[in-house]
Amino acid sequence: MNLRIGLLLVLGCVMGAGLQASGQDAASAAAQTRVVFLAGGRSHGPGEHEFNAGCRLLARALEEQSGLGVRAEVVNGWPADDSVLDGAKAVVIYADGTSVVGKGWAKMDALAKQGVGIMFMHYAVHPSAADGEKYYRPWIGGAFETGWSVNPHWVAELKALPDHPVSRGVPAVVEAFDEFYYNMRFPQDHSRVLDLATATPTRERMKRYINLWNEHGVAGLDKPQTIMWGIERADGGRGVGFTGGHYHRNWAVDGFRTLVLNAIVWVAGMEVPSGGVRSTPLTEADLNANLDDKGPKKVVLTLPQPGEFRAIPTAPVDTAREAKFGQPAAAATR
């Protein structure tokens, strides 16, 4: 009898410890800050617009390397059940235009009004002019606008806003080659918009002028341009827009990656560590993980090398094209 009682007591202790541990795990998971990434579909050639791979790379850094207690989830496209977004402190959208957010305007607007942080990256900062006015400027402070903004490929020397949390651990200058859009459509009163990262485009740094190059792009040469911006909204949430992210290889540039990770943590309402959000330098294997299948032409992405970006030939100026440009319009919202 005594043996039976003893066994029952031991079993009870084991079960109690298991329940306690399970409860602690649940509490720990509940205490984590949730960040949800919405990744766009396959787009462009190999190594370009790698939305899924980029989101998974950043999510892994936040959840496994930062030490900040972040629970990062990646959803491909707009979620079939958008309740997955409930409880998130930030939603990061990295996609072609409004291909993802356009399936959930009302849900995203409701989340914004609840104070959820919202961040758009690269092409995802480009809505229609009407959607930019209705959603993007209230949510994140600005947006790309066709006929106003430009999308050249150039080598930028990114400079983070001094003394702002996104600048922590970021070198004074971060050089990267990307399709850095500029001349965003901001509110006429720019005072609420934070210029989180800027760079100055020059003719020498231009490597490709493409479809949306216009008179505003020419007028913006040799002047600091906002590449990443943010706002602190009246609803208590934060918003960030970042125009980089065309070329997947840039995630291997430590300062570039840290700048974006800092911005995600900031937009989620967390404290950015004094040395910036910690992440492990990428290997070539990391860079080539989770890439979209873009057909039979397989490309192995390599780590960027010092001086590589500046060695890219400067793009010739199409003077005939630019001669047809009109005069730049005054900066004003529509």
Image (cartoon, helix red, strand yellow):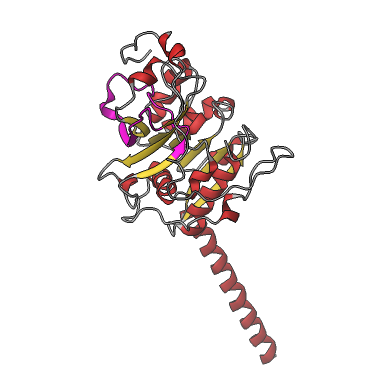
Can residue 67 be found in the magenta stretch?
Answer: no
Which of the 4 image quadrants contains residue 329?
Answer: top left
158 left or right, relative to 305: left
Can residue 195 be found in the magenta stretch?
Answer: yes
> Which of the two residues, 103 or 327, is positioned nearer the viewer here?
327
Residue 184, x across and y down, in percent = 39, 24
Question: Secondary structure of the magenta portion, mostly?
Answer: loop
Which of the 4 image quadrants contains residue 293?
Answer: top right
Q: Residue furthest bottom?
A: 2
Q: Residue at x 60, y 42 (%)?
A: 52
Q: Residue at x 36, y 53 (%)?
A: 276
Residue 135, x across and y down, in percent = 45, 23
Give the quadrant of the N terminus. bottom right
Residue 191, x across and y down, in percent = 25, 27
Q: Residue at x 29, y 27 (%)?
A: 223
> Which of the two residues, 61 or 80, is positioned nearer the viewer here?
61
59 left or right, relative to 215: right
Q: Which residues make up the magenta segment?
A: 177-205
Above or below: residue 209 compared with residue 227: above
> Which of the two residues, 12 or 123, is positioned nearer the viewer here?
123
317 left or right, relative to 197: right
